[in-house]
Amino acid sequence: MRMTLRSTNPDHEVPDDLVLWRYLDFPKFLDLLASRAIKLPRASKMEDPFEGVMGSGATKAALRAAKGRGEKSYLRNAVANREQHLSFFWRERTYVSCWNAFPSENAGLWRIYGDDKGVVVRSTWRSLRQAFTGNADVVEDVFFGPVSYREVADDSSFPLTFTDQFFVKRAEFVHEHEFRLVAHDVSRDHNYGERDTTGLPQFATLECDLDQLIEEVLISPRLGGWVRDTVEDVSRKYGGAWPVRRSAIYQPPPNQILDF
């Protein structure tokens, strides 16, 4: 299947030099090397149970607007529940790849996603975009863009499409500063089982050129220096030419200043 990248906001161009980080444990890094593909998990399998679901503030605002239009209460409730049902329907059929948009590595994210067992892949939007070969398994349109963070209990604005809902997260996750790839499985074979999700793929797979994608691999600052050699050796065995280094964020300052 051929995939196409689509912006969530065509009026706002993502800069090519936007630095993106993907924190991985070592097994997932090996899977990236072996599959030569980025795997997007189903939104319903992600940690945040509110992925893709409209916030309570937006739901209340929609109900107030419907009441202002003179709609009957039972109709307002039915429409709200239909929207909620569709949100959960698409959670099972939407796939998300999460990157972190920071100019440098982040000590907090090391702690959360792989402090004692992880690596991080550094890329840029240009490198990520150009790495895709155009081949995918279960998705066609892949949307990209930054995530916005809101106090969803108070925020009365709501996304216009179910795709947009996956680019909004609760303010409690603002520390992630996410940039996402989001794709929907629109296959008739996968989308019309309603509540039966047993046949749905666990991942959507986007083939990519790893040497184009990976600009650098960093080893967790809490792992021994020998791990760098191991990761570099594994990278070379899979044909990777990217540099590998251990994070230096906890390297102590010199105890003597030698500059004049």
Image (tube, rainbow, N blue to C red):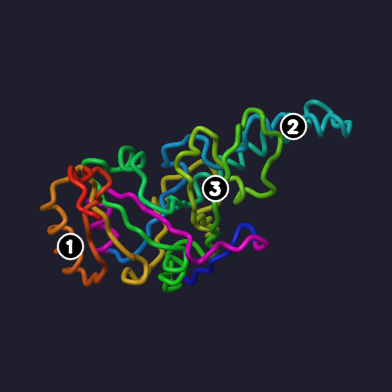
* Dot 3 crowding, Cα within 10 Å, few <14, some 14–19, many 20+: many
Q: Position of residue 47 (x, y in %)?
A: 41, 37
19 within the magenta span = yes
Circle 2 residue: 61
Amino acid beneath label 3: Val
Q: Earlier in the sequence, mark 1 or mark 2?
A: 2
Assign a secondary structure to mark 3: loop
Disc assigned to residue 155:
none
User: Can residue 252 be seen at all in this image of the molecule?
Assistant: yes
Q: Would residue 98 be seen by someone viewing this image from the given angle? A: no
**For the residues carrying marks 2 and 3, which lies nearer the camera in this image?**
3
Instruction: State the residue at coordinates (16%, 69%).
Output: 237
What residue lies at 38% left-to-right and 57% top-to-bottom?
A: 39
Q: CA distance from mark 1 to mark 2?
A: 53 Å
Element type where label 1 sits in the image: helix
Q: Which residue is more in the foreground, 237 or 95? A: 237
Where on the picture, by quarter, is residue 112?
A: top left
Tell me the CA gap for discs 2 and 3. 22 Å
Residue lying furthest left: 226
Residue range (magenta): 10-34
Residue 170 position, x and y percent, is 55, 35
The residue most toward the top is: 73
Graded by Cα atoms within 10 Å as few (under 14), some (14 to 19) or many (20 or more), the crowding at tag 2 reads some
The residue indicated by pointer 3 is 147
Q: In 3D space, how far apart are the residues under numbered discs 1 and 3 (Cα atoms)?
A: 32 Å
